[in-house]
Image: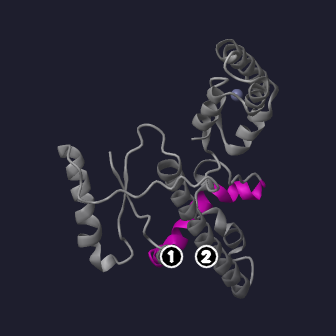
């Protein structure tokens, strides 16, 4: 299934939109909802000091950020209460933006940095200008989905695969020698130096050089043979190319 994605939405446009989303939530009664939820499900826990913001519904964005405000409301000056409320709103805006960036990163990493087999093409849609929603988002998205259903190529071009190794922390590598898949660049470097890998490498080199010597010993001078062995056999070089590709 093709995946339309708003990767063209610049981060300032996105940030502004996310801040506005929080303001809209406040305008439509977020605080009453929070107070009610606090009274029903968290007040008792807080009194027993057994509140837990790491699990279940309590970890959701938009509740824990107002902890201080909710537990002190009516027990402190209106000024303090107002300050704590502002602090909560600011925190909510921050975590909302952080979460959106995380989602964007996830999509990029999953679909664009190291798309494995079965990953669909991703299409970028221009979502910055909401007034042009129909023609720049809805219609192109429907066209892409329609073309998928009908089994034809859509008019739009998919987003180019990034394949950025530095951004790609969880890249995966195939070690043909050990017949293993190694996840992550750091793990790959460690694997290349590991005992088991070096053992496989030694075994392969010996096998190759034995075969090489048997076939080529009569046509290659001893010096040249030595040099080739040090660099690794042509077969060995092929393997390295395949592994890093
Ligand atoms: Zn290996």
Q: Are marks 2 and 1 in contact (CB under 8 Å)?
A: yes
Q: Which mark is residue 26?
A: 1
Q: Identify the colour scheme used.
A: one colour
Q: Which mark is residue 89?
A: 2
Image point (60%, 48%), residue name:
56
Ligand 1 falls in which quarter? top right
| 31 is within the stretch colored magenta | yes
Image point (65%, 67%), residue name:
65
Q: State which region is magenta.
A: 20-49
Would residue 93 be found to the left or right of residue 221 on screen? Answer: left
Farthest residue to the top: give it. 214
Q: Residue 159: x percent and y percent?
A: 40, 58
Q: Nearer the viewer, residue 218 or 37?
A: 218
Badge 2 or badge 1: first in the primary sequence: 1
Farthest residue to the bottom: give it. 79
Would residue 244 be found to the left or right of residue 10 on screen? Answer: right
Rendered view: 26 above or below 113 = below
Q: Residue 189: x percent and y percent?
A: 74, 40
Q: Nearer the viewer, residue 188 or 129?
A: 188
* Mark 1, other Cα within 10 Å: few <14 / some 14–19 / many ≥20: some
Q: Residue 202: x percent and y percent?
A: 77, 21
């Amino acid at each position: 299934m093709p995946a339309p994605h708003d990767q063209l939405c610049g981060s300032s446009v996105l940030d502004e939109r996310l801040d506005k989303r929080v303001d809209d939530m406040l305008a439509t009664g977020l605080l009453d909802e929070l107070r009610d939820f606090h009274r029903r499900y968290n007040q008792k826990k807080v009194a027993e000091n057994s509140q837990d913001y790491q699990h279940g519904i309590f970890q959701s964005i938009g509740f824990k950020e107002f902890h201080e405000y909710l537990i002190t409301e009516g027990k402190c000056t209106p000024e303090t209460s107002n300050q704590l409320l502002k602090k909560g709103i600011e925190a909510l805006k921050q975590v909302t933006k952080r979460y959106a960036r995380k989602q964007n990163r996830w999509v990029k990493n999953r679909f664009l940095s190291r798309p494995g087999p079965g990953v669909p093409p991703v299409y970028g849609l221009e979502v910055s200008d909401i007034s042009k929603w129909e023609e720049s988002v809805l219609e192109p998205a429907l066209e892409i989905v329609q073309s998928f259903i009908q089994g034809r190529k859509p008019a739009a071009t998919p987003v180019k695969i990034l394949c950025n190794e530095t951004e790609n922390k969880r890249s995966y590598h195939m070690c043909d020698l050990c017949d293993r898949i190694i996840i992550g660049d750091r793990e790959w470097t460690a694997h290349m130096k590991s005992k088991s890998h070096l053992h496989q490498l030694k075994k392969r080199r010996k096998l190759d050089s034995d075969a090489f010597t048997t076939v080529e010993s009569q046509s290659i001078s001893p010096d040249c043979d030595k040099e080739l062995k040090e660099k690794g056999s042509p077969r060995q070089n092929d393997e390295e190319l395949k592994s890093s590709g």
